[in-house]
Image (cartoon, rainbow, N blue to C red):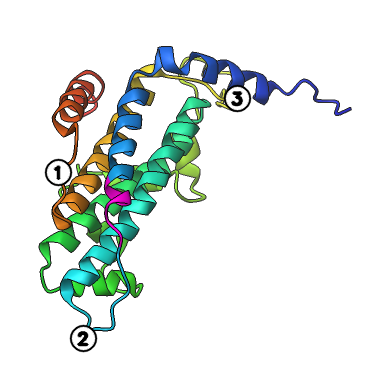
């Protein structure tokens, strides 16, 4: 038997997961957003084409489907990570969702299909340039947890409630800050919702329950993101 049995990580993760539905009302909203995105994906197949040149509408639909597939799984990853108490580690996925949402909007706006073609080929503008109206400093802040950056540790893994002049206390075991966690979930849900809308608009779909989801998102943004903004 391992000398570290029982695992402090498993115990903390299990307890945080048990309390997640009570602590994190935005989990329900994020779940609704991903179910909406999944609904749109299921109704957006892209059949192979022999047309030469390949039509712009086909390329846009292809790119948006790929973006949506990545978006729904990335949002679920954010939810699972936060449920277990690893809130800072969810930030790279928020960074990815911000990029996916930006690329979806740029694909939709470029009726020539060129942006979609370049993205599908692994070319075109880099991830930061894909963002649409990002808040100042957002990309840099999220990037610190996306790379092996010492500033990510200093920014997100130092526990300010425990730090004193004699020692620095770091977050090692998973923990929960409900306000931060719910704010992160609200962001993820909003990105998933926007990607679903872009895919639906491209494929002439009417998203069911969108108004109710938008109302829940507005409430979540007001409660958890207004001070941060």
Image quadrant for the N terminus?
Answer: top right
* Residue 131 seen by the camera: no
55 lies above or below 224 = below
Mark 2 crowd level (few <14, some 14–19, many ≥20, 10 Å Cα): few
Residue 7 image offset from top left, x and y in percent: 73, 24
Sequence-earlier tag: 1 or 3: 3
Kindly state the secondary structure of the residue where label 3 is placed. Answer: loop
Residue at label 3? 173
Q: Which residues are magenta?
A: 40-45
**Could you say which disc has been placed on residue 53 in the image?**
2
Front residue (pair 17, 165): 17
Front residue (pair 164, 213): 213
Residue 184 image offset from top left, x and y in percent: 34, 31
Q: Is residue 20 left or right of residue 108?
A: right
Residue at label 1? 206
Mark 1 crowd level (few <14, some 14–19, many ≥20, 10 Å Cα): few
Asked if the residue under mark 3 is in contact with the one under mark 2, i.e. CB atoms within 8 Å, the reply is: no
Outermost right residue: 1
**Could you say which disc has been placed on residue 40 in the image?**
none
* Residue 225 seen by the camera: yes
Which of pointers 1 and 3 indicates the residue nearer the eye? 1
Q: Is residue 44 magenta?
A: yes
């Amino acid at each position: 038997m391992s000398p570290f049995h029982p695992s402090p990580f498993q115990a903390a993760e299990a307890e945080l997961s048990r309390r997640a539905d009570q602590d994190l009302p935005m989990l329900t909203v994020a779940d609704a957003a991903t179910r909406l995105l999944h609904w749109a994906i299921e109704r957006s197949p892209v059949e192979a084409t022999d047309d030469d040149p390949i039509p712009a509408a086909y390329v846009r639909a292809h790119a948006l489907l790929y973006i949506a597939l990545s978006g729904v799984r990335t949002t679920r990853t954010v939810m699972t990570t936060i449920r277990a108490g690893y809130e800072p580690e969810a930030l790279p996925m928020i960074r990815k969702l911000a990029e996916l949402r930006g690329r979806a909007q740029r694909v939709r706006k470029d009726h020539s299909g060129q942006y979609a073609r370049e993205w599908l080929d692994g070319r075109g503008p880099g991830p930061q340039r894909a963002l649409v109206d990002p808040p100042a400093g957002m990309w840099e802040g999220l990037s610190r947890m996306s790379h092996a950056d010492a500033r990510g540790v200093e920014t997100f893994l130092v526990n300010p409630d425990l730090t004193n002049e004699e020692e620095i206390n770091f977050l090692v075991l998973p923990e929960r800050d409900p306000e931060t966690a719910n704010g992160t979930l609200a962001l993820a849900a909003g990105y998933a919702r926007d990607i679903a809308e872009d895919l639906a608009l491209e494929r002439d779909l009417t998203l069911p329950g969108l108004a109710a989801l938008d109302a829940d998102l507005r409430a979540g943004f007001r409660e958890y993101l207004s001070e941060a903004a």
